[in-house]
Amino acid sequence: TGEEYEEKLKLEEEKRVADEKYRYKRRQIKELQENLQSMEKDFHIVLKQEALFQEQKKEKEALILQLNKDIEEQKPKLERVKKQCSRLSREIQSLKKTKTETQEERDIDLRELKSFNRTFDKLLADVLEANPDLTTAFQMYFHQSDLELPTVGSAGGSQSSRSPSTQSSLASTRSSRSASSGSSQASSLKVIDLSLSINAPAEAATVDAQPASRAGTSDIFKRKKS
């Protein structure tokens, strides 16, 4: 009859809607299961990385402790060497009947100054590489003292690639020079005031209008002119 046919169509429509909902729920369940599996996989990876980092941390801490121990062990040796060097210096001055620095002492001081400059140049280059916004301000201060701002490539210094035998030969050559040539060899020192102010980057734009030298009593370091 007509009523039964309409009832049948209504039931079929309800069945179709129910089937669509069922398929939609199945897709959702499948997606959730896939997401859950992916999250579990990522979680296991994170756990492995955490375990690896913990192991590396323990190794680094053990290495730091060992290095600190080595440093403490070297301190007495360093003090003994300093005392011995001081004693030998006094003996040399006594034998030469002079109280001024010997050529050898000046040579050692010069090498220490060069080593300090190389270390400082590398440190400054690393800082500027990590903070490029400071480059302009530092260029201004170095320009005022007619110095070239160190870069990552030049911070190592030309002497860092020399072999020990070459350095030893150069040291012997320098030590054999006379005191007069040693004093003429000594280069003038440049003084740079690094009392950076907040407006330092803005001041860099007027570097040509500023005096070529600035006097300062704080945060001053000495650099050997290349």
Image (tube, grey):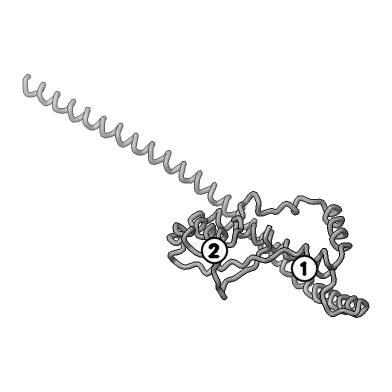
- Amino acid type shown at disc 2: Ala
- In contact (CB < 8 Å): disc 2 and disc 1: no
Which of marks 1 and 2 precedes in the sequence?
1
Given residues 23 and 59, the one toward you in this image is 59
Q: Quadrant of residue 34?
A: top left
The amino acid marked with disc number 1 is Asp
Single out the mark in the foreground, 2 or 1.
2
Dot 2 crowding, Cα within 10 Å, few <14, some 14–19, many 20+: few
The percent position of residue 187, horizontal first and vertical second, equals: 72, 63
Asked whether 186 or 84 is in front, the reply is 186
Quarter location, residue 215: bottom right
Left or right: where 189 falls relative to 109: left
User: Which corner quadrant holds the N terminus?
Assistant: top left
The circle on residue 182 is none
Residue 224, image x and y in percent?
A: 68, 63
Q: Residue 104 in the image: x percent, y percent?
A: 85, 68
Q: Residue 36 in the image: state x and y as whole percent.
A: 43, 43
Q: Can residue 122 be seen?
A: yes
**Label for residue 212?**
2
Q: Which label belongs to residue 109? A: 1
Badge 1 element: helix
Q: Residues within 10 Å of mark 1 (few under 14, many from 20)?
A: few
Q: Residue at x 55, y 56 (%)?
A: 128
Residue at 14 percent across and 24 percent down: it is 9
Quick one: SS at disc 2? loop
Q: Decide: is 34 above or below 125.
A: above
Residue at x 44% of width, y 57% of height? 205
Nearer to us in this view, 152 or 215: 215
**How far apart are labels 2 and 1 at the CA level?**
29 Å
Residue 170 lies left or right of residue 139; in this view the side is right
- Residue 59 in view: no
